[in-house]
Amino acid sequence: MAYKRGVRKRAHENLSDANIRRVISALEEGSTKKSACEMLNISYNTTRLNRIIEEFEEQENYVAIRKLQTKGKPASPDEIKQVIQDYVEGESISDIAKSIYRSQAFVKGIINRVGVPQRPTGEDKHKEAMLPDACLRDSFEKGEIVWNAHYHMACIVEQEYTLDFQNASPGINTVDYEEMYGCKMYRVWCYNLIPYSDEYETLGWWTGKKKIGFSAHTLCQSLGSLKHLKEYGVSFED
């Protein structure tokens, strides 16, 4: 979790948690502040260096206190909602765990318990994942936000490839997908939510997240409903 609270990070600077810890260790072992600035790839400025380290240590202490406060406590409704929302929108389990001051096992437990479609890792990263039973459907509505188990990301249903639609669309070869594959075919728009860059923040414009994605054709059997997650207060429409 890169430190962001008070010190504004410039594009070329390395202010990651791991690197700041490395710098602190180096200073304790006798390295000069000039060397510490070089390690962080910042201009030689002892005042700014001290500020970076002080604010990082304050954040570390705050995180330690928050973890003690949540240790052993069951997941709150707000935590469940945030885990679901963030994971479906593309956040990693490790980043979610950091944001709620919980362990990765805690986050994985919520995902498994409520039936959130999962993104495989390691050797299975490029394989289609099995959908939880709660996600399985025979059809989807136009405009519905669903999970794509082939691309491991959320997507918006744009068009069902019915026989009538195909026959009315020039340049499309008509295929009876239900006859051939036993399920419907959809055109979908797959996306992740990407934070706006520091450039926008510097200019003082509105900041947040935007959908970045691509169009794809996916069989119904590879799409999963997310409607059952709405009982936890989650909304994917915004």
Image (cartoon, rainbow, N blue to C red):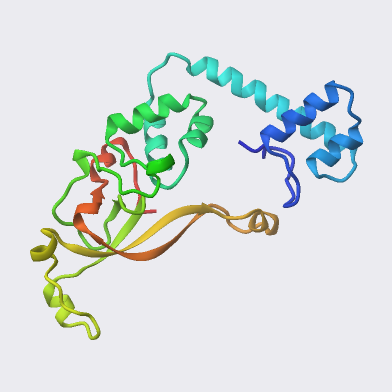
Q: Quadrant of residue 132?
A: top left
Farthest front residue?
Answer: 123
Residue at left 10%, top 63%?
178
Residue furthest to the left in view is: 179
Is 13 above or below relative to 210? above
Residue 83 visible at all = yes
The residue nearer to you, when weighing 218 against 198, is 218
Residue in the foreground of this view, choosing between 144 and 28: 28
x, y percent for residue 114: 28, 33
* Residue 55 visible, this angle: no
Residue 119, how many percent across, how many down? 37, 43
Name the residue at 91% across, 30% down.
32
Q: Which picture quadrant has residue 80?
A: top left
Please name whichever residue, 74 or 125, is drawn nearer the observer in this view of the structure. 125
Query: Eyeballing the image, is 77 above or below 186?
Result: above
Q: Is residue 70 above or below residue 183?
A: above
Residue drawn at x 87%, y 46% as measured from the top left:
43
Query: Where's the N terminus, which quadrant?
Result: top right
Instruction: Give me the residue at 31% from left, 42% from top.
Output: 117
Q: Is residue 67 left or right of residue 42?
A: left
- Give percent across and percent down for residue 126: 38, 50
On screen, residue 1 versus residue 152, left or right, reads right
Q: How many marks?
A: 0
Query: For this view, does 212 lie left or right of residue 11?
Result: left
Q: Position of residue 107 (x, y in %)?
A: 41, 29
